[in-house]
Image: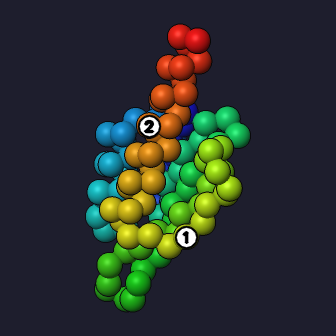
């Protein structure tokens, strides 16, 4: 699974981990259009930062194909977006382990 972070000026990719996801969402300041994405084969999850109002709190438009239900899309707070990414990581790790042992 890969993590991609694009801040509008540069892009980086790395093997995904919960620590890196939390670090990506903790970056300040986060500009509008800042993107954080996970990809694992056909499954993916992306969050794009949008400002509630100038100088206000950042929210994220989150969308993805998670593989365990219909495609998702919605506007979430930072903490809600982090939770979705945590669930995506947990689901992938659980199914990877199941595939290795079964």
Residue 100, given in percent of the width and then of the height, sits at 55, 13
Between residue 82 and residue 57, name the one nearer to us. 82
Q: Which residue is mark 1?
A: 74
Of helix, strand and loop, which one carries label 2?
helix
- Answer left or right for 15 relative to 99: left
Of helix, strand and loop, which one carries label 1?
strand
Residue placed furthest toward the top: 101
Residue visible at 37% across and 89% down in the picture:
54
Residue visible at 68% across and 56% down in the picture:
70
Disc 1 crowd rating (10 Å Cα; few below 14, some 14-19, many 20+) is few
Quarter of the figure with residue 82: bottom left
Residue 47 higher or lower than 50, as above or below = above
Residue visible at 67% across and 35% down in the picture:
41
Q: Say how the picture is coloured.
A: rainbow
Q: Look at the image and tell me whether residue 9 can be seen.
A: no
Cα gap from disc 1 to disc 2, whole angstroms:
20 Å
Quarter of the image for the N terminus: give it. top right
Between residue 73 and residue 56, name the one nearer to us. 73
Residue 79 higher or lower than 50, as above or below = above
Q: Specify which label sits upstream in the sequence, 1 or 2.
A: 1
Residue 95, given in percent of the width and then of the height, sits at 55, 27
Q: Which residue is mark 2?
A: 90
Residue visible at 67% across and 57% down in the picture:
71
Disc 2 crowd rating (10 Å Cα; few below 14, some 14-19, many 20+) is few
Quarter of the image for the C terminus: give it. top right
- Answer left or right for 72 relative to 35: right
Between residue 6 and residue 100, name the one nearer to us. 100
Residue 47, given in percent of the width and then of the height, sits at 51, 60
Residue 23, given in percent of the width and then of the height, sits at 31, 48
């Amino acid at each position: 699974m890969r993590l991609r972070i694009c801040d509008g000026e540069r892009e980086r990719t790395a093997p995904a981990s919960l620590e890196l996801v939390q670090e990506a969402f903790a970056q300040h300041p986060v500009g509008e259009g800042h993107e954080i994405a996970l990809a694992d084969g056909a499954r993916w999850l992306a969050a794009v930062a949008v400002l509630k109002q100038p100088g206000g709190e950042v929210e994220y438009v989150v969308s993805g194909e998670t593989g365990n239900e219909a495609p998702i899309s919605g506007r979430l707070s930072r903490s809600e977006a982090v939770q979705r990414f945590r669930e995506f990581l947990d689901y992938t790790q659980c199914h990877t382990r199941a595939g290795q042992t079964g």
